[in-house]
Amino acid sequence: VAYWVSDKLIGKFKYKSLAEYAETRRGLQTGNSPRFVRNWYEVSIDNMDLSLNDKCKESSKRWFLFNSGGSFRKWYGNIVNIVNWWHEGEDIKATGKAIIPSEDKYFQEIVSWNKISSGNISVRYQPSGIIPGDASPFLHTMNKNVLFYSMALMNSKIAGEMIQVLSPTLNFEVGNIAKIPMIIKEEEKVLSYTKKCIQISKNDWDSFETSWNYKQHPLISVISQNRALFDDTSGIDLAECYSCWEDECNERFNHLKVNEEELNRIFIDIYGLQDELTPEVEDKDVTVRKADLQRDIKSLISYAVGCMFGRYSIYEDGLMYAGGEWDYNKYENAAWRADGKTETLKFYQNTCFMPDEDNIIPITDEEYFSDDIVSRFCEWIKIVYGEKSLEKNLNFIAKALGNKGNTSREVIRNYFLNNFFKDHCNTYSVTGSGKRPIYWLFDSGKQNGFKALIYMHRYDADTVGRVRTDYLHKAQKYVENAMQSAQYTIDNAKSAS
């Protein structure tokens, strides 16, 4: 019973329903998510199919992209999971506990939405090559225009009003969504705005390293995108890079908001509900991110740590290593290929940034080791942005972090000692299943006496032994020597102080 609904809105239900244009379906329910579902960054890239086409079902890989819901987000994104669909789900099917509807639609191009939400429905485009999960019911049709038009309608205020009538609970079930009345008019305009919304949201999603299509940190990519603004010879100002990134984010946010409001205006006119609805979209409902200085500087630090471990390289886009055979030499080769290209990063002082050789990066209260994380980070900043701007950029980073310290290096060191791993775990976490870090921390306790990071994809049988003998024991000797020196000073001091 929807007593509040106007006669005009009720009258729209005489039109054909969404179900007459496309199928609404449920996705895969594995029956044992802890066993069969992972985040994409937890598994070796060699065992995963990221090809994004419907031929994935013929692949011999074990893990495939899996749409398992996520937070409120419209148009594109939220696909961070993978599922074990080896040999067409042989292991899942063998348990006898899985529910596998719509298997013939797996890996096809669809639009999906979150099954459970306390707010409005949020519908996203899902390219081919992905398996839809039970938490993400979906709409399927071979008519691409109908697919995109349906998506635009479902993300509009019109559908929001109708869904309140059809599905007043927290669940957006396929049967209820299928009853939305669909009037197809102004199709060309709707499709144009919809494709723009998808592209804007995709660009936003791929700007952060939890996307499998992440290329490079945006505070680096803005250099090549705005080459005329930067002078390599005097060093690149990180504050200017952030300013360019902030402008890009604001432009993306505003464009998406304008496009969504235009789609609302079109559908309100089509359904004749001008007296009941307005096209305006609140900022909180625009699901692309604006720039945030502290968050973006922390993500730059995270990217730099990825370069230290060889997950990324500043000389090539995307993942350099995420499992499989480790090849140290390919980083140097990538660097020399990039040298001298005006559209990408240059060398400074004829040097290049190479990953850590033993996959162990120590974090200590002082610089005891040659591969100390702070000194390596400063080296990375110098190579990326130039030596002449190094101190200015370190000061900018330190101010953004806001940690304690008398110098920029002290502030950065305190961040690595106290906050980096916590932030890393928050970035690589899953609602309901907790932290899934890809860099693992060895930690001697609350006094910050000794810490070391390793990259899980490079972990081997000798890693723990090397942490102990090559780093922990040496750190202990440094501390013991410092204590002996302090004791000698005390014993030979002439004043009580």
Image (tube, rainbow, N blue to C red):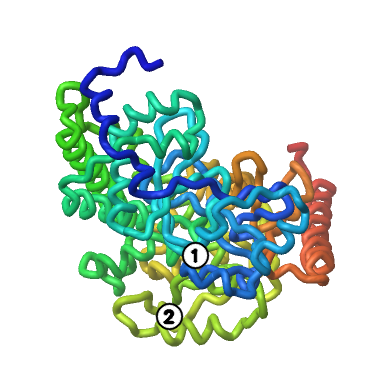
> Callout 2: 10 Å neighbours few (<14), some, many (20+)?
few
- Say which quadrant the C terminus sits in: top right
| Image-quadrant location for residue 176 | top left
Residue 200 or residue 53, whichever sits in front: 53
| Image-quadrant location for residue 473 | bottom right
Q: Which residue is mark 1?
A: 129
Query: Type of residue at label 2?
Result: Gln
Query: Type of residue at label 1?
Result: Gly
Q: Which residue is mark 2?
A: 349
- Tell which circle, 2 or 1, labels the residue nearer the N-terminal end: 1
Residue 452 image position (x, y, % from top left): 71, 58
> Callout 1: 10 Å neighbours few (<14), some, many (20+)?
many
Say which residue appears at 49% left-offset and 25% top-offset.
169
Residue 339 image position (x, y, % from top left): 39, 84
- Say which quadrant the N terminus sits in: top left
Determine whether 250 is above or below 235 in the image: above
Marks 2/1: CA–CA distance: 44 Å
Say which residue appears at 74% left-offset and 61% top-offset.
91
Determine whether 393 is above or below 73 in the image: below
Residue 474 or residue 462, whichever sits in front: 462
